[in-house]
Image (cartoon, helix red, strand yellow):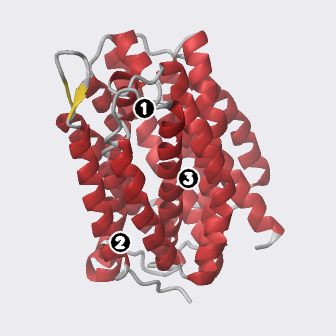
Amino acid sequence: MTKDQKIILYLLACVQFTNIMDFMIMMPMGPILMKAFNITAREYSFLVSAYSISAGVCGFIAAFFVDKFDRKNVLTIAYIGFLMGTFACAIAPTYSMLMLARIVAGVFGGVLGSQVVAIVGDTVKYEHRAEGLSIIMAAFSTASVLGVPLGMYLASTISWHIPFMFVVGVGFVNLLLIYRYLPNLRSHIYVSETKPSPFAVLTNIGKDSNQLRALALSVIVIFGHFCTIPSLSPYLTLNVGMSVDNISLIYLVGGAITIFSARIVGRIADQKGKYLIFATCGTLFLIPVFLMTHLQQGASLTVILLITSMFFLFANGRTITMQAIVSGVVNNEQRGGFTSINSSMIQLGSGAASFVGGLIVEKASDGTLLHYNWVGYMSISFMILGIILGKYVKPVEN
């Protein structure tokens, strides 16, 4: 990759850092928010899914027009709206207002995430796509290592409002960097005397079974992942007996491992084959999912961190390679619309997973959670299905 490509990738990674942290900070803050608003684990899972569902709906709508505009302009507008929604989260006085603020943040966050992936697809060739996406995915790890522990520290020592303010502050700096260093990106804009139908993106997807399989792969994998996430922190504290103060260690240790492994996984995938590494990471992912959803009272902190770190490691490798596989099923002219639809499906899938997981997991009379192991079985089943389906998703880029 060239120096200019790396600058763009690292800038997009900074944007994704705030986008991911805004979403991820909700996970470990579950016990804090449940206490602050006097809500149940199920109501909390609805709070998590609200962001994903609104992001999915807006991402779907955005698919009809994003390819008509400069990607830099779309990214900038979406980022401003996202930061405004996050600021609203920071000052929300009630559960209802926080729910509304999460919806607003999700509306713009969905467009933001899809544009980041589209820009990577436009600027990095398919042969190096996994490595390029690994830089973007490093934002997930950095948010885990730096953002989540810092956010948890601020939330527990000052107020739960402060982590959202931190995201807004970092995001404002990113906006200045976008204005200064991100070039205008118009090469994808279709030039013709007759304008294509705004619904062409759906027509193209509907006529291409390969694109349909790619969308299905994204939904299946993300559903299997997020059905376990919202109840993880409450389960570890209520059932396993883990201290709330130690929850951030899960993200610190797991994120540190993925920071160092992401680029390695990306390079190996580009060299050895993206599906091979996807299937390998997906298969290994089944082990920590089973162990994590079957942890018992009194499990040591070392055991918990070992299992959750494996979860982060293999989930990250699987996601990098899956995104690289999916990004190759369209050309530049269709990429913005397709990635918006794909992002929409991912967000709706994660929102549905959080919602379904919240319906399955119940609170017992003694305060512990029931049926979390059922969610684990569901996650394993979806991942196996994803491994099978991934073999039939083929790239069209040369």
**Residue on which the image places disc 2:** 387
Q: Which residue is mark 1?
A: 299
Residue 298 sits in quarter: top left
**Label 2 crowding class (10 Å Cα cut-off): few <14, some 14-19, many 20+?**
many
**CB under 8 Å between callouts 3 and 2?**
no
Q: Which mark is residue 32?
A: none
Label 3 or label 2, whichever comes before in sequence order: 3
Relative to 153, 376 lies left or right: left
Q: Residue at x 67, y 35 (%)?
A: 146
Q: Quadrant of the N terminus?
A: bottom right
Q: Is residue 82 left or right of residue 228?
A: right
Tell us which disc is closer to us: 3 or 2: 2
Number of residues whose C-alpha sits closer than 10 Å to that of mark 1, classed few (under 14), some (14–19) or many (20 or more): some
In the depicted view, which residue is nearer to us: 49 or 293?
A: 293
Sequence-wise first label, 3 or 1: 3
Q: Which residue is mark 3?
A: 74
Q: Are marks 2 and 1 in contact (CB under 8 Å)?
A: no
- Residue 378 is situated, as x and y percent measured from the top left of the image, at 24, 52
Task: Give amino acid for label 3.
Answer: Val
Please tell me whether mark 3 sits on a helix, a strand or a loop. Answer: helix
Looking at the image, is 233 positioned above or below residue 392? above
Which kind of residue does numbered mark 2 sit on? Ile
Residue sitting at x 35%, y 25%: 99
Amino acid type, label 1: Ala
